[in-house]
Amino acid sequence: MTRSLGRWLLAAGAFLLAFAVTAILLGAYAITELTDARRTGTTYVDPAARLAQRMTTAFLDQETGVRGYVLTGRADFLEPYRTGVRDATEVRARLTELTKNGGQLERSNLDAIDVANQAWVSGYIEPTLEIVRTRGASGNTGNSARGKILFDAVRAALDRQTEHYDILRGDSQRRVDNAGATLITLCVTVAVLLVLAIIALFLGTRRVVLKPLADLRAEARRVAGGDFDHQLAVHGPREILDLGHDVDEMRGHILRELDALQSAHRALDAQARELQRSNAELEQFAYVASHDLQEPLRKVAGFCQLLSTRYRGQLDERADQYVDFAVDGAKRMQVLINDLLAFSRVGRTSGEARAVDSAELVAQAQRNLAAAIEDSGAEVVAEDLPTVCGEASLLTTVFQNLISNAIKFRGEQPPRLRIDVRPVDGMWEFSCSDNGIGIEPQYAERIFVIFQRLHPKEAYAGTGIGLALCRKIIEHHGGTIRLDTEHQGGSRFVFTLPAAPDATTEGGHD
């Protein structure tokens, strides 16, 4: 049964937590033992040992004072005795207070000292001092031997007390040393076990997580390298297995998408071949239209004009009107065929794009329309125009159509066309604004459709192909053209053209 990565991590975390808690508890115990050992030594054993030593000194002072008094009979020699008595009494009281929670042995030692001291005082000191006071100093009171025996008993009791506290001090020091050694051993053990746990965790993570992930990555790279038919072989925790399953599902999806894409490519190839065939037929049609259709149409138009010239007035008025209709239809057919040919040639028989001065393009368009401009009194304002990249003949057609439309669809005032330009993202954006009759916003797209007219042919001449031809030329050059529907007082067309490679689009025009 495959184990979950989450359970594995939970088990590892529980182990580390238990290890940490155990280490903390053992460390706290060792620190507590060390603290108690030090506290026992500093608050009980050491002070008691110092008091025991002080008590011994106090009794020695008493013995020295008594011996000096016996030898000299001078009262001032008893001062060490009196001081020793006070010190012994004070030390006895302090030891009693200090050892009230101590063991039975401490109290027994104090009692033994009291008994020996009482025997020494009553059996030697008091009789000896009385003899010296009554008889004077003689150097020998007859009690020296007894006094030595009694004081030796006191000294023996004091030595037992001192030896006891020396033993306690040694035990306390050993306890401190043992507690410190235990703490050090525990710290070292915990450190070693922690390192081993980290190593084990790393190895476990590498085996349970990293190795399966590396294998999954290798499998995924094999698929990414192009072997889409390879089915992923994944092992490891459930999460990695699920991830591998998802990656394999993605592989299958990519494979299905690839099959669909290849099918689409095959369909596109078939459509491309069909389009090539259709284009070949269109080229053949254009050839026929430009050669085979033009000649009969010219004959029809020519003979209709001869008929109108030679026989006008010889037939009735209706016959003359029919002849005029035939001549007009032939002429319109010639114009339509020529416009269709011009529209079909854009992007098919064009020359190489190069840097051209747009000011020269506008000037050429004005020369082509010189008669119409002069008759209408039109004015074209175009200043500081840039250098663009394109085909001069096609771009001249764009400006010529826009100027021609401004003249054709003029209002009551003489037509006025203004051409402005500004740089936009490596392109030049031209805007051609006129003061004509304008175009309603709902026709903003319709006017660019071939042969779409907004007015009857009796009102305005033309075939309705001009703006469609402009859009095809602009898009052939990688730009866009649109009607500015927010412009008031005429029409404004906005189109973009690519800047020439050596032209600057920052800080002015060429």
Image: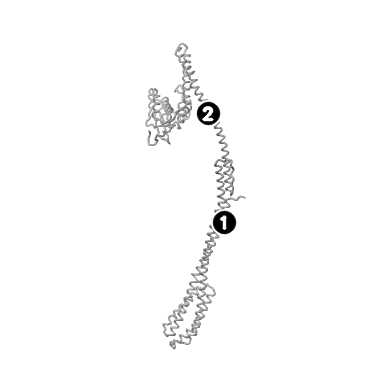
Task: Please provide percent x and percent y for residue 64.
Answer: 45, 81
| Residue at disc 2, secondary structure | helix
Q: Which mark is residue 276?
A: 2
Question: Which image quarter: residue 391?
Answer: top left
Task: Please provide percent x and percent y for residue 283.
Answer: 50, 25
Q: Nearer the viewer, residue 70 or 451?
A: 70
Q: Amino acid at mark 1?
A: Phe
| Residue at disc 1, secondary structure | helix
Q: Quadrant of the C terminus?
A: top left
Between marks 2 and 1 in the image, the one whose residue lies nearer the viewer? 2
Q: Nearer the viewer, residue 440 or 248?
A: 248
Q: Which mark is residue 223?
A: none
- Above or below, 438 against 245 in this view is above
Q: How is the image coloured?
A: one colour
Q: Residue at x 42, y 82 (%)?
A: 77
- Tell me the residue that label 1 is attached to: 15
Left or right, 170 with reference to 395: right
Q: Residues within 10 Å of mark 2 (few under 14, many from 20)?
A: few
Question: Which image quarter: residue 409?
Answer: top left
**Outermost residue, top direction?**
314
Q: Amino acid at mark 2?
A: Gln
Task: Please provide percent x and percent y for residue 278.
Answer: 53, 27
- Above or below, 201 against 181 in this view is above
Distance in Å between CA atoms under marks 2 and 1: 74 Å
Disc 2, disc 1: CB below 8 Å?
Answer: no
Q: Residue at x 43, y 85 (%)?
A: 71
Left or right, 239 with reference to 390: right
**Outermost residue, right direction?**
1
